[in-house]
Amino acid sequence: MNSRGSTNRLSSTSNFRSRMSFLMLSMFSTMAALYVAGRVYLIQELDRRTGQGRSAISVDDTLKIITCREQQKRLTALQMELGKASQEGFVSKHLLDNNERDSKKKLLAVIGVSTNFGNKKNRDAIRKAWMPTGLAFLSSPLFLDFFCNIIDLVLIRSPARKKLEEEKGIVIRFVIGRSSNRGDSSDRAIDDESRNSDDFIILNDHVESPQEQSKKTKSFFAHAVEHWDAEFYAKVNDNVYVNLGTQYKEPPICMKEIAKELPNVCQHWHVEAGNDNEVKNRKKLYLDAIGAVLTSYLDKPRAYIGCMKSGEVFSQPEQKWYEPEWWKFGDGKSYFRHASGEIFAISKALAQFISINRSILRSYAHDDVSAGSWFIGLDVKYADEGKFCCSSWSSGSVCAAA
């Protein structure tokens, strides 16, 4: 009996220990599972907070990432532009493709007529002589003098000027700066004239002065290349008259006001001053085209076109053409070869070069010398164009100096 009781007690104790072991293992397994799950959750939460996971990051961090990507794109674009510049010229063909361009179609030339505050008479003469106005479409000479008297009204949205820009690809504007006394009567007069004629480039950052003509020319080229996409950019003085290559049904008269003050211009182009009745007896007149001359240089990516000259450097202050930095031109005191300032043209690549480097390009006393100095160290095609010699009266000249 005792033996059977002992056996039962031992069996009961063994079962209890087995159950306890199972419970303990279950508890440890549950705790281990909870620990592992907790660690996984903490890792995921850490990834989310440090931006390594797939959860959304803050708005500020997003903006920073976008900014960095934009800067990277710009850097890549600039590197590509720089690579093209060494092959195509001084800068890329797409330097300034902005919304301020006045023409979507590429023009042949932008001509800037350099003028000043006291030269309204010259500007009016140019408008009547060669800058296109509504007069070009008047086939009846009886109305010619009448419209000349109200020239300011005719100039507004001139169909002839628009036709010249659209068909021949030539834009013409007077170029002038601001008065040293900003807002004075000179500035107001130019503003009024510009509103009436709509044919000005007003350089607001340039102070008009005879001593600052070189800087004015530089500012014009920079402004023009930033606003118009053209093959060439030309600078002309306001005492020069240009053949634009216009064919008239009736020959244009050399108007009485111009013939009286500028007879050489009329003589040069074989046009006599006269009254309306004489117009019918004149021969048809075909003017040489400045566009034809410029077109012949389209295959030259860096062309500098003009009546090339050189000459003495004047070192005495009392002399008319005094050059303050005469000593830079050596003991011979002779200027390097450069185009006459009456009229010269440069290709787009050179205009872009001026625009980019305008703050470091040196200006001398005379704008034609200054322009020549900007190109003297560059790989430029110097085109000594006889048709740009306005004072020589050569056959086929595109210009005449008053």
Image (tube, rainbow, N blue to C red):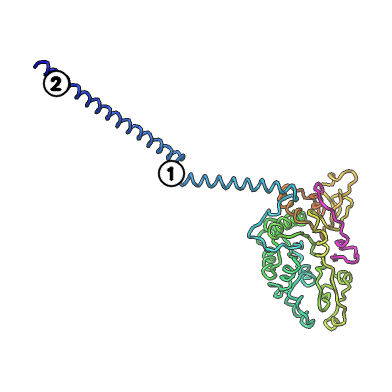
Residue 287 position (above or below residue 73):
below
Kind of residue at badge 1: Ser
The quarter of the picture where residue 235 lies is bottom right
Callout in the foreground (2, 1): 2
- Report x, y in % for residue 74: 61, 48
| Mark seen at residue 121 | none
Furthest residue in direction top, as rendered: 2
Packing grade of label 1 (10 A; few <14, some 14-19, many >=20) is few
Q: Residues within 10 Å of mark 2 (few under 14, many from 20)?
A: few
User: Which residue is disc 1 drawn over?
Assistant: 55
Q: Which residues fall within the magenta stretch? A: 376-402
**Of the residues shown, which amino acid type is indicated by label 2?**
Asn
Secondary structure of the residue carrying tag 2 is helix
Indicate the position of residue 122 as horizontal and vertical percent values: 78, 67
Q: Considering depth in this image, is 337 or 82 the residue closer to the camera?
A: 82
Of mark 2 and mark 1, the one earlier in the sequence is 2
Q: Residue at x 74, y 65 (%)?
A: 169
